[in-house]
Amino acid sequence: MKKWFFFGVLCVLAACQEEKVQTDDDFDKYKEAFVLRLWEMNPGWASSTGFHKYDSVLVVPDKAREEKERQFVQKELEQLSQFQSDKLSEANQIDLKLMRNYLEGSNWDREQLKSGEWNPSNYNVCGGFAEMLGNNYAPLDERLKNFSIRLKHVPAYYEAAKKNIKNPTKEHTQLAIEQNRGGLSVFTTDLPAALEKSKLTAGEKAELLKRSDAAIKAINGFAGWLEKMPNPSPRSFRLGSELYAKKFEFDLQSDKSAKEIYQSALTHKKELHQKMVKISRQIWNKHMGSKPMPKDEYVLVKQLIDQLSLQHTTPENFQKDIEKQIPQLEKFVRDKKLIYLDPKKPLVVRREPDYMAGVAGASISAPGPYDKNGNTYYNVGSMNGWPTEQSESYLREYNDYVLQILNIHEAVPGHYTQLIYSNNSPSIIKSIFGNGAMVEGWAVYTELMMLENGYGNNSPEMWLMYYKWNLRTTCNTILDYSVHNLYFTKEQAMNLLVNEAYQQQAEAEGKWRRATLSQVQLCSYYTGFTEICSLREELMKKQGKAFDLKRFHEKFLSYGSAPVRDIRQMMLGK
Ligand code: ZN
Ligand code: ZN
């Protein structure tokens, strides 16, 4: 009996050994199954990517759920360790790293960062429900039935949230109150409107409304509870160096540490200032006539920027002007042979849909991983109904120079071009865990690259406005690092943004608020930008005359939205 048992164990061990030699095929199968398990664990996230199988499920963030998450991560990490990275294709090696980073990061979130305790705005069900009504992915009645089942657990959801929250920050508490109350209109306005159009039975409708009332009560109850909660020594919104350094590692996946990137940004800011002063002196008379040149260098640059900002479009022509520029940018990119552009995937410029409104500006909406053939939209904010003063200030910010840089960044060859390449690198892992620093870094890099190649006819005015724009990106990093590590006061922050980066008061106030509510994200732009610039420099040195800019861009983007660190490794063969 004993002997037989022993034999059995040996067999199992041998089977494991054999499994060690895992191929790309095995890994692809594992990935596919992993993604399905990931969606089962995270129904809300699944819905937002266009995977609607779990729409009726609302996860209650209680202790049992926490344990389930822990086990999920542990199991997946164990399975991942079965794969030997160097036996896999380049694309799969990167996927493996992205998956491990996600799993280890979510462990760290739960055990160390613990934002579920101090950030009450983590708890909000409204967005998910709004998506179910606003997004037409399935027949209305089907969506409403799932909506109804999902509603059942809203009271339990907020009860669990209350148990998790301990010593929250004042800023995130306030945000949670605003956002939860703000989201209520889904149940008070959107739902009744949808019910009118639906063919649900009277009984089903009554049941749904009953559940909706209970949800409204739970949301109001949560907001009221937060308002009255005694919180004599709230936690600081500042993350502190230790947590910040680690979050930086998980979120940006850079070769450099947070501190190194911060120091690089400080140096870069100094260089930008020197260049701006030099240009300003050079073109002062051309734009300011006989007006005496200010002695103070900041005043000098600011006056010129203000003068150039007067050249801008009108609220009526804003969208048309953006539309007109896209083919011009595409022509420039083709003529200069900067990167191949796929003509089969046009960019659709449209007025920002209502549910996005509020923050005017421009943004790209890309089709999700489950809707690859969907349109890519360039959403342009409308200044409809704005007081003249407000639209004037906005248009000065997005003046004729900056508007071109914005289009490079958002569209061609920035985000929109990168997206097409990313979709051609068909890895669902990269579209789920895509690296924000790479994506933003690419868009920021293309601004410089276009100007280097003569976009804007090398005019000093264009360069001056570009430097101002790049200074904003650079100062995002300095601000975020300083707020969370060096305990920057609001006064210090405003001095940095308004006096040293030439920003409008309102813009600077918004940035300060963003830095108090988020951590690390503001660093992604500069981090990716500087990493891509160094990689290009390294390759130019290595390849000498053989270096080809177009080939570099196409190769770089062919890896999908992977961390620059990993792309670098593949491109340099290290
Ligand atoms: Zn004007
Ligand atoms: Zn961007």
Image (spheres, grey):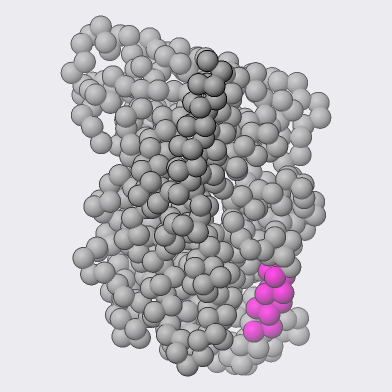
Answer yes or no: is residue 355 visible.
Answer: no
Q: Position of residue 464 (x, y in %)?
A: 56, 81
Q: Quadrant of residue 226?
A: top right
Q: Residue furthest top?
A: 203
- Image point 36% across, 77% down: which residue? 339
Which residue is nearer to you in this view: 223 or 270?
Answer: 270
Looking at the rendering, the stretch of residues picked out in magenta corresponds to 264-275
Q: In the figure, 381 relative to 311: above or below?
A: above
Whether the magenta-drawn stretch holds residue 543 is answered as: no
Left or right: 258, with 557 as reference point: right
Q: In the figure, 323 relative to 370: above or below?
A: below
Q: Quadrant of residue 334?
A: bottom left
Which residue is nearer to you in this view: 61 or 210?
Answer: 61
- Image point 58% across, 39% down: which residue? 106
Answer yes or no: is residue 551 visible.
Answer: yes
Left or right: 300, with 529 as reference point: right
Q: Position of residue 505 (x, y in %)?
A: 64, 59
Quarter of the image where the C terminus is located: bottom right
- Image point 33% across, 13% down: which residue? 208
- Image point 44% across, 62% down: which residue? 90
Q: Position of residue 116 (x, y in %)?
A: 63, 31
Q: Position of residue 286 (x, y in %)?
A: 55, 92
Exactly how many numbered labels are in the figure? 0
Secondary structure mostly taken by the magenta-highlighted segment of the chain: helix
